[in-house]
Image: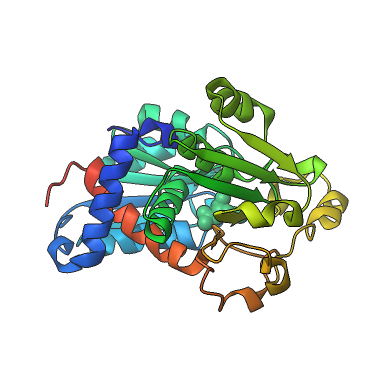
Amino acid sequence: MKNLMNITDLTVEEIDELIAVAEDIIANPEKYQDACRHKLLATLFFEPSTRTRLSFESAMHRLGGAVVGFSEAGSSSSAKGESLSDTVQTVGCYADIIAMRHPKEGAPVVAARRAGVPIINAGDGAHNHPTQTLTDLLTIWRAKKRLNNLTIGLCGDLKFGRTVHSLVGAMARYSGIKFVFIAPEELKFPRYIIEDELESRGIPYKEVTTMEEAMPELDILYMTRVQKERFFNEADYIRLKDTYILTPDKLIPAKKDLAIMHPLPRVNEISVAVDDDPRAMYFPQAKNGMFIRMALILKMLEVTV
Ligand code: NCD
């Protein structure tokens, strides 16, 4: 596989393999500690990040490889007016693989044309975030021991949240999946993804506006942050930002084996009082991100262990 732009660039079988490798890495980390010796990962982050960038970098270090990169556009030559294409073509001369995040939808596709080395989309605007989805799939797998027959509630900013767009594209390929979209009218899940991924395949979904309506039937509750940086108007952000706040009392009607997920960062949408609930999976989810990225780097560099 040359590049990872979208989660659907991977087949279901390839995802199963990545999960199996991640499980093996978790069980036998020492087996992998020199797998990427003398290999170099570049992380080019034109947008803020904690988990994605640091889990990619930790992943490469834990494989015995090395890392270069930048964490804000202002510290790269893009601040001098260099095109993305030229930046990436240059970095492709130094590194063996590139993970990049950019505020413009489609930027990694443009970058991949000139890079000369594999490119991983680490988030492009409100569009896609395939490695977060791999993280989410490993988390669901570890919590439920299956990726089929699940009712998945997605809650919050479903319009601008790229993680939920990629997650729906991935989960729509498994059997027995039902989606419940929980969002205010202004932040509803994009119609084009519903048509392409769900209606075309007859996959059941419903759209509701309150968490209460959905809670009792959910196997997974995937909370998201209202994406402040994608709003045109601050007043709209302020009005919508606290629409959903998950608190322990809201979980009373929930299933005993619900998995509560969140790609993080959270702002207000999950109360810290939920953190000690055994169903809270969001910090294990962040940890899983490192293991699945280790598996992905091995696959893309065609390293066998
Ligand atoms: C997400 C992102 O960047 O899209 N964060 C992440 O990668 N874990 C979610 C978000 O920023 O809300």
Give the image quarter of residue 245.
bottom right
Image quadrant of ligand 1 equals: bottom right
Q: Position of residue 291 (x, y in %)?
A: 32, 59
Q: Quadrant of residue 113?
A: top left
Q: How is the image coloured?
A: rainbow
In the rendered image, residue 231, in percent from the top left (x then y), is placed at: 76, 46
Can the viewer see residue 224? Answer: no
Foreground pick, 102 / 265: 265
The furthest residue to the top = 200
Point out residue 301 in the picture as x, y percentages from the top left corner. 21, 43
Left or right: 190 in relation to 263: right
Location of the N terminus by quadrant is top left
Residue 192 seen in the figure = yes
Residue depicted at x 23% and y 43%:
299
As rendered, which of 3 and 226 lies closer to the eye? 226
Q: Is residue 266 above or below residue 248?
A: above
Q: Is residue 269 left or right of residue 169?
A: right
Q: Position of residue 59 (x, y in %)?
A: 31, 60
The residue sitting at 44% across, 33% down in the picture is 173
Question: Which residue is located at x 15 percent, y 68 percent?
Answer: 30
Q: How many marks?
A: 0
Q: Is residue 138 above or below residue 172?
A: below
Instruction: Please state which of residues 9 and 179 is positioned toward the viewer in this rendering.
Output: 179
- As drawn, is 48 to the left or to the right of 112? right
Instruction: Please tell me in which quadrant of the rendered image residue 205 appears.
Output: top right
User: Could you say which is closer to the camera, residue 97 or residue 147?
Assistant: 147
What residue is rendered at 62% in x and 24% in y? 195
